[in-house]
Image (cartoon, rainbow, N blue to C red):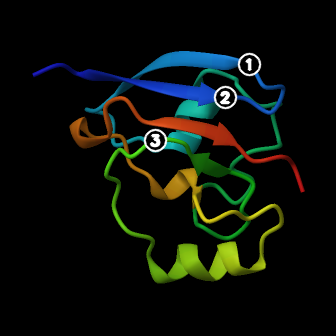
Amino acid sequence: MSVDIKIKIIDREGLTHEVLAPIDMNLNIMEVVRMYELAPEGTIGICGGMAMCASCQCYVLNSIAIPEKGDDEEAMLSEAFNVKPNSRLGCQIHITDEIEGLEIELAPEA
């Protein structure tokens, strides 16, 4: 079993990054974006990954099966800007083997 999965991330400038995300560190998409510095510091994960700010909102671009939204995520997205039907909070998508090949786009800053 591999310890990294590939994820494609389109940053807020429209640039595509194919990154390797470790599955053995209990990370989420927001933390991977921060790890690779794909958003300016202080503009993503402001709440620390507690589903309380929507700064890590992203759009899921392909049909990789990811866990359903929880109540906290639904509530935060109902108050966020630039929400689309495929919006998710990056802090709520954990890095696992199952999301290998996930493609996301970071939502614009509110």
Question: Residue at position x 22%, y 21% from top?
Answer: 3
- For mark 2, give the secondary structure: strand
Disc 1 is placed on an element classified as: loop
6 vs 76, left or right, is left
> Which of 49 and 104 lies nearest the eye of the viewer?
104
95 relative to 76, above or below? above
Nearer the observer: mark 2 or 3; the answer is 3
In contact (CB < 8 Å): disc 1 and disc 2? yes
**Which residue, given by chain and number where applicable, does mark 2 sit on?**
10
Q: Earlier in the sequence, mark 1 or mark 2?
A: 2
Q: Amino acid at mark 1?
A: Leu
Provide residue 19's location: percent of width, then percent of height. 49, 18
Q: Which residue is mark 3?
A: 62
Q: Which residue is mark 1?
A: 15
Instruction: Tell me: residue 39, above or below residue 17.
Output: below
User: Residue at image x 83%, y 46%?
Assistant: 108
Q: Quadrant of residue 50?
A: bottom right
Q: Earlier in the sequence, mark 2 or mark 3?
A: 2
Snapshot quadrant of residue 89: bottom right
Residue found 70% across the figure and 25% down from its top: 38
Residue 47: horizontal and vertical position, in percent?
Answer: 70, 60
Residue type (three-letter) at the residue carrying disc 2: Ile
